[in-house]
Image (cartoon, helix red, strand yellow):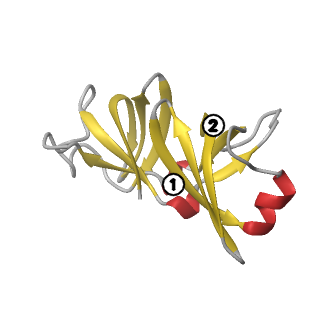
């Protein structure tokens, strides 16, 4: 599980759904949550939270241009690749923090992903969850 620390900067809620923006090292990560500040006390402007998303939910792009619907797009550098027969893990450097992506080995070859490459990591907002930050981390 990928985990990044950030601060809530925007909350839009309607019924039992919230769209929450979190500032992580100057980039905005958005989470679509099935809860509101009424259900979850940690959902307050200015609160520090952990942004969580699975490795299998991180897509990678090289030279992406144009508009897309994915809200979570961050620039990263490939640290290393662990290639498997079907799936491979790509470990990325995001502002000194590691983000992992698990994609098909065929995609690794097609995109010619190798250490040192600049790639964009993309995660759909509904695949991001937030958790109250544990001060012990």
Quarter of the view holding residue 21 = top left
Q: Nearer the viewer, residue 1 or 30?
A: 1
- CA gap between label 2 and label 1 equals 24 Å
Q: Residue at x 34, y 33 (%)?
A: 6
- Residue 10: percent from left, percent from top: 39, 28
Circle 2 — which element?
strand
The outermost residue toward the right is: 110
Q: Residues within 10 Å of mark 1 (few under 14, many from 20)?
A: some
Q: Residues within 10 Å of mark 2 (few under 14, many from 20)?
A: many
Quarter placement of the N terminus = bottom left
- Counting every numbered tag in the picture gives 2
- Residue 27: percent from left, percent from top: 50, 27
Camera-side mark, 2 or 1? 2
Residue 128 horizontal side relative to residue 101, left or right: left
Q: Residue at x 21, y 52 (%)?
A: 39
Q: Nearer the viewer, residue 37 or 5?
A: 5
Residue 61 horizontal side relative to residue 92, left or right: right
Q: Do tag 2 and tag 1 residues touch (Cβ < 8 Å)?
A: no
Q: Residue at x 82, y 36 (%)?
A: 63
Mark 2 vs 1, N-terminal side: 2
The relative height of residue 56 versus residue 71 in the rendered view (above or below) is below
Quarter of the view holding residue 75 = top right
Q: Which residue is mark 2?
A: 77
Q: Which residue is mark 1?
A: 126
- Residue 42: percent from left, percent from top: 20, 42
- Residue 49: percent from left, percent from top: 28, 39
The label number, if any, that marks residue 23 in the structure image: none
Q: Residue at x 48, y 60 (%)?
A: 54
């Amino acid at each position: 599980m990928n985990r990044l620390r950030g601060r809530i900067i925007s909350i839009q809620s309607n019924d039992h759904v919230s769209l929450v923006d979190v500032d992580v090292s100057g980039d905005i990560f958005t989470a679509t949550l099935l809860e509101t500040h009424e259900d979850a006390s940690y959902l307050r402007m200015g609160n520090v939270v952990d942004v969580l998303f699975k490795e299998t939910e991180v897509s990678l792009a090289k030279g992406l241009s144009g508009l897309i619907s994915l809200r979570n797009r961050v620039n990263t550098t490939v640290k290393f690749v662990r290639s498997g027969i079907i799936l491979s893990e790509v470990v990325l450097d995001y502002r000194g923090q590691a983000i992992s992506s698990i994609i098909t080995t065929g995609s690794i070859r097609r995109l010619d992903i190798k250490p040192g490459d600049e790639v964009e990591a993309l995660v759909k907002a509904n695949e991001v969850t937030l958790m109250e930050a544990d001060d012990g981390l």
